[in-house]
Amino acid sequence: MILLTPVALLHNNLLVAVLLIALGFLGMLLQRNAFSMVFSLLLWLQGAGLICAAYGQSRGAREGSLSFLLIVLFLIPLLSLLSFLMIQSRRIRQSPLPKRETEPETEPSYHIFPDQGTGPGE
């Protein structure tokens, strides 16, 4: 029953939160894909939110839960907007570019074959 004491629960929650933050940080450093970086940032923020919620639970106060709610309400929509913008930029890059109209080619002043004359009278 020692694992269910408030201090032990706080330590367990903090351990999980630190692991989430470390995984998010490593993901941000090691990933090259933009989507993976966004998901790593989400892991990082979930760890920070868990710290706030665990602190609030251990103190019996609502400030930790309120901080977690603020993280969710403000940062998650920003990250979803970032994901949307990345998807749109990828679609633009993958779509074929419209062909530019080029100037009509003029006939060169020289001819490759000797039987071709330079004019109608020759």
Image (cartoon, helix red, strand yellow):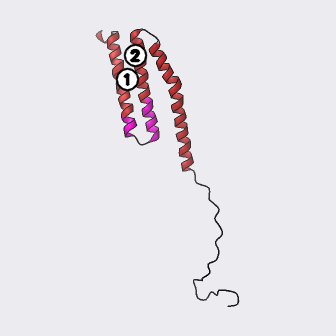
Looking at this view, name the residue that lies furthest to the bottom: 122
Q: Residue at x 55, y 37 (%)?
A: 84
Out of 31 and 70, give the one closest to the viewer.
70
Residue that mark 1 sits on: 17
Q: Is residue 51 left or right of residue 93?
A: left
**Residue at 40% over, 25% down:** 47
Distance between the alpha carbons at the discs numbered 1 and 2: 9 Å
Numbered mark located on residue 8 in the image: none
- The picture places residue 109, in percent across and down from the top left corner, at 62, 81
Most common SS among magenta residues: helix
Residue at the front extreme of this rendering? 109
Measuring from the top left, give residue 87's x and y in whole percent: 54, 41
* Element type where label 1 sits in the image: helix
Residue on which the image places disc 2 = 54
Amino acid marked by disc 1: Ala
Indicate yes or no whether the magenta region holds residue 104: no
Range of the magenta residues? 26-42
Residue 89, position as x, y percentages in the image:
54, 44
Residue drawn at (41%, 12%) of the image: 57
Horizontal side of residue 67 vs 4, given as left or right: right
Q: Residue furthest left?
A: 2
Q: Quadrant of the C terminus?
A: bottom right
Mark 1 neighbour class, 10 Å CA radius: few under 14, some 14 to 19, many 20 or more: many
The crowd level at tag 2 (other Cα within 10 Å; few <14, some 14-19, many 20+) is many
Name the residue located 53 percent from the left edge and 45 percent from the top edge: 90
